[in-house]
Amino acid sequence: MHRRIRFSIVAFIGLVFISSAAHATTHDFYEGKTIRMIVGFAPGGGFDTYSRAITRHLGKHIPGNPTFVVENMTGAGSLIAANYIYKVAKPDGLTMGNFIGGLIMQQVMGGPGIEFEAPKFGWIGVPVKDNVVCALRKESGITSAEQWFASKTPVKLGGTAPGSTTDDVPKVLKATLGLPIQLVAGYKGTSQIRLAADSGEIAGGCWAWESIKVTWRKALEAGDVKVVLQAIPEPHPELRKVPLAIKYAKTDEARKLIQVGVHDPGAITRPYMVAPGTPKERVQLLRKAFLDTLKDKEFLAEARKAKLDIDPVTGEQVERIISGLFKVEPSLLAKLKEALAKK
């Protein structure tokens, strides 16, 4: 009897030692290290702005206080960055990625160029749910949704690539609402779309209000840019007079397509992740550090000053949302695929 008790005590101590050793190894791992943050869009855009603000504070919430280096890996609406994180980045927790969540729906629909399996990434979290709006320069002559619907010529909107909010939202709205839209794709980020709109090359574009109000702030304040439509389920508190796109949908199918193709992806538009195969304990450590950063008083003060909204989605929630996207009914998926395939 005593021998069994002694064995149980020894076994318990052994397990505690192993667990403590693993914990110590994980927590010591980042000391003196540098973490690369791969951002799939150009400097100056919303993704870049959020990533640089977050990485200025994230290191102090990771044991060992690693430093961060932000790298902009542009191309194909952040698909190059997504494929890089999946295929090339080492699964050691020293490379984080930030590409657009719309690429996940592209994988669901079998889109070209996708070389990743979304459920296999180590999802860290999302800093804010996107509230997608369409903003146009006043020179376009379109300052309201009614004027847009009545336009006799297609309104030129800037896009980056399939799978990006800038491309997918206009395509879904055109297919479901009949909005006159001509998508001009190929820009490397929303910063370039803004410049193109400011120069008169295009009228504007559709992407997150959280990004637009920060990066296009002066033009908004001057009245040179107008938000004419919201592609979200409920009005944003700051845009209560701007109509919701889904209110113009005339059929149940149109409403479902807007829900699946625009509203649902909005929660995971700005995800952060690490490569598949990254040790689970490091994924968990980074998830905690990410959420702690978004609660950090110094970070929040910087975010308020820069007018960056914070409304986090946890890594676990991101996993569940992605799982749901792979369960969309085939008939609706076919309709969505058809809408997104059109130019």
Image: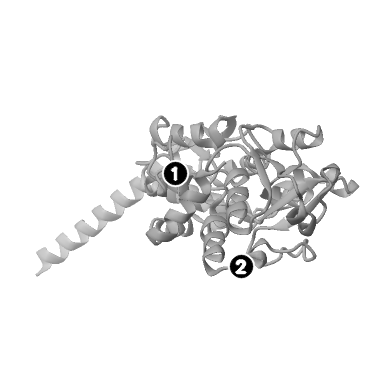
**Percent position (x, y) of residue 323?**
40, 57
Circle 2 crowding by C-alpha within 10 Å: few under 14, some 14–19, many from 20: few
Q: Amino acid at mark 2?
A: Lys
Drawn side of residue 142 relative to residue 22, left or right: right
Residue at x 59%, y 30% (from the top left corner): 72
Which residue in the structure is indicated by mark 2? 250
Above or below, comparing residue 330 to residue 298 in the picture: below
Residue 44 in sight in this render: no
Sequence-wise, the earlier of marks 1 and 2 is 1
Image quarter in which the C terminus is found: top right
- In front: label 1 or label 2: 2
Q: For this rendering, which residue is in front, 24 or 212?
A: 212
Query: Judging from the image, what secondary structure is the residue with disc 2 in?
Result: loop
Q: For this rendering, which residue is in front, 112 or 295?
A: 112
Drawn side of residue 106 relative to residue 191, left or right: left
Which residue in the structure is indicated by mark 1? 27
